[in-house]
């Protein structure tokens, strides 16, 4: 495969810059053609950092948004929280969850009067469940849902009387393979779908936010990585989901639609009639840490381009 000189140049001198915003419309509005509402962007984080993967809850009338904060100086992510102020704006973030390894995609849910988070913990090679001791800044590990499995972008939901867990696998088709588990309770035990991986498609497999019900139908946001990682979100209509079967079909594609973050969009999550979103732009590298990060990525990017688009 021919290697693009411009692609290599961009890998060297430019850095990805993700950011998080909120939309005052329900997630189901994205099923409508050409829905491009105004995005209210959160405050910009410190230099050498970006934020992505937003999930949220409303408590006592206030909006709390948890997201990944990635630091180029450490090449590691942690979970931070943006809390709505009395004037309905958002100030600086505060650390909500940090461990020695990388964290991202802080999937939030409530069950039996408790608040839980399933952050991406693929570097620990497990899917872990955390319980809020004092939401949103104190958490304890409640259970290991799936051991010895480096899950990516784990999304959990109830459907047809069961709990379902969807994710990708860091070590097996991280951009194109979808894996599913089922359980009677959130804490498990979780059983793998008999057809895993249930779907193989770079266009619409890897989870991209919260599945949702609309007019009695289950919809699942998924990442479109067919040309590049996190380029847009495909909303799929789930036609069949049982312990042995899975079938879904594409309904619409949500592409980046508001400047300056027009190069990518890979999360849509629902929060009580609101929608959280992230967007990507590129900027020139501005520090030694960012140069070092790009140098580390360059080799793997070249290998992927030479190997072909479906490796």
Image (cartoon, rainbow, N blue to C red):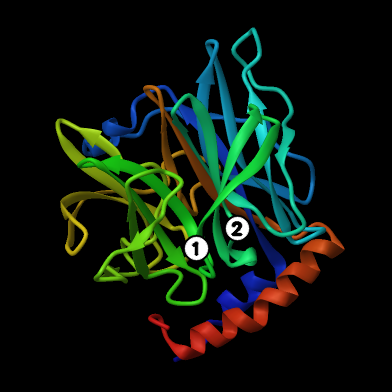
Marking on residue 73: none
Give me the C-alpha separation between circle 1 and circle 2.
7 Å
Q: Residue at x 42, y 86 (%)?
A: 308
Lateral position of residue 172 relative to residue 204, left or right = right
**Residue lying furthest top in this view?**
86
Query: Left of 47 or right of it: where is 109?
Result: left
**Pointer 2: residues within 10 angstroms few (<14), some, or many (20+)?**
many
Position in image of residue 213 (x %, y %):
24, 35
Residue at horizontal 18 percent and vertical 56 percent from the top: 242
Q: Nearer the viewer, residue 289 or 59?
A: 59
Q: Nearer the viewer, residue 93 or 102?
A: 102
- Can you tell which quarter of the image residue 64 is in? top right
Callouts 1 and 2 close, C-beta under 8 Å: yes
The N terminus sits in image quarter: bottom left
Residue 177 horizontal/vertical position (percent): 36, 70
Name the quadrant containing residue 89: top right
- Quarter containing the C terminus: bottom left
Label disc, if present, on residue 151 of the rendered structure:
1
């Amino acid at each position: 495969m021919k290697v693009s000189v411009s692609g290599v140049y961009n890998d060297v001198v430019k850095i990805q810059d993700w950011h998080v915003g909120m939309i005052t419309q329900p997630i189901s509005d994205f099923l409508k053609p050409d829905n491009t509402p105004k995005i209210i962007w959160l405050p910009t984080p410190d230099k050498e950092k970006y934020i992505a993967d937003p999930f949220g809850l409303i408590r006592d009338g206030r909006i709390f948004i948890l997201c990944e904060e990635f630091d180029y100086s450490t090449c590691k992510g942690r979970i931070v929280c943006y809390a709505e102020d009395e004037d309905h704006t958002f100030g600086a973030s505060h650390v909500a969850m940090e461990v020695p390894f990388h964290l991202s995609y802080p999937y939030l849910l409530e069950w039996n009067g408790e608040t839980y988070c399933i952050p991406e913990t693929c570097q620990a090679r497990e899917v872990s469940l955390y319980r809020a001791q004092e939401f949103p800044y104190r958490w304890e590990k409640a259970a290991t849902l799936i051991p010895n499995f480096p899950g990516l972008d784990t999304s959990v939901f109830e459907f047809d009387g069961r709990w379902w867990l969807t994710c990708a696998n860091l070590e097996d088709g991280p951009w194109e393979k979808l894996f599913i588990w089922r359980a009677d309770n959130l804490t498990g035990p979780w059983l793998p779908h008999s057809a895993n991986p249930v779907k193989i498609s770079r266009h619409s497999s890897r989870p991209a936010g919260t599945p949702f019900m609309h007019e009695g139908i289950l919809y699942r946001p998924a990442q479109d990585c067919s040309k590049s990682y996190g380029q847009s979100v495909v909303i799929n209509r789930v036609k069949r989901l049982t312990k042995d079967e899975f079938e879904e079909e594409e309904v619409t594609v949500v592409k980046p639609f508001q400047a300056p973050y027009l190069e990518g969009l890979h999360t849509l999550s629902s929060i009580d009639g609101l929608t959280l979103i992230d967007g990507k732009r590129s900027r020139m590298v501005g520090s030694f840490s960012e140069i070092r990060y790009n140098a580390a990525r360059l080799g793997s990017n070249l290998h992927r381009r030479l190997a072909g688009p479906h490796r």
